[in-house]
Image (cartoon, rainbow, N blue to C red):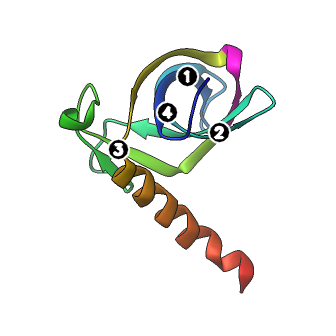
Amino acid sequence: MLKPGDVVLAKLQFTDTFEVKTRPALVLFEESDNIVVAGITSNTAMKGIPITKKEGAIKDSVIKLNYIFTVSRIMLDKLLFSVSKEKKKAVFDELVKRLKILSE
């Protein structure tokens, strides 16, 4: 059973191509075998929440909260690691900040 904060390898289809690529992603939540994830990139010049090798990433990376996908459980390859409570809080705070405009 996956939990929020797990980093998985997932087959994702990006907006600029029809190609499906296997990429790391952060689990945000799961419901009815659908998993909502945020993409992770090793391009540290991109905007997002940093995640380091020390935290478990293969290389220093960025959690991209503008790359959110819903994938089926069968699109997941494996669990890589879980982020810290502090990193989960940073993701939560950034998502709330971005979604707060809905209540205005």
As rendered, which of 73 and 11 lies closer to the eye? 73
> Which label lies toward us, 1 or 3?
3
Q: Earlier in the sequence, mark 4 or mark 3?
A: 4
Residue at 61% x, 20% y is 20
Q: Please state the horizontal and vertical placement of residue 84, each as a whole percent of the image.
A: 35, 44
Kindly state the secondary structure of the residue where label 3 is placed: loop
Q: Earlier in the sequence, mark 2 or mark 3?
A: 2
Residue at 26% x, 25% y is 58
Kindly state the secondary structure of the residue where label 4 is placed: strand
Q: Main secondary structure of the magenta part?
A: strand
Residue highlighted by disc 1: 10
Q: Quadrant of the C terminus?
A: bottom right
Q: Please state the horizontal and vertical placement of residue 73, each as a whole percent of the image.
A: 69, 20
* Name of the residue lying farthest toward the right: 32
> Which label lies toward us, 2 or 3?
3
Q: Amino acid at mark 3?
A: Ser
Residue at 48% x, 66% y is 93
- Rounded to the nearest angstrom, the CA distance separating label 4 from label 3 is 15 Å
98 sits to left or right of 41: right
Q: Contact, CB < 8 Å: mark 4 with mark 1?
A: yes
Mark 3: few, some, or many residues within 10 Å (few <14, many ≥20)? few
Q: Give the vertical position of 94 relative to 9 (above or below).
A: below
Residue 69's label in the rendered image is 2
Q: Amino acid at mark 2?
A: Phe
Residue highlighted by disc 4: 25
Mark 2: few, some, or many residues within 10 Å (few <14, many ≥20)? some
> Which label lies toward us, 4 or 3?
3
Residue highlighted by disc 3: 84
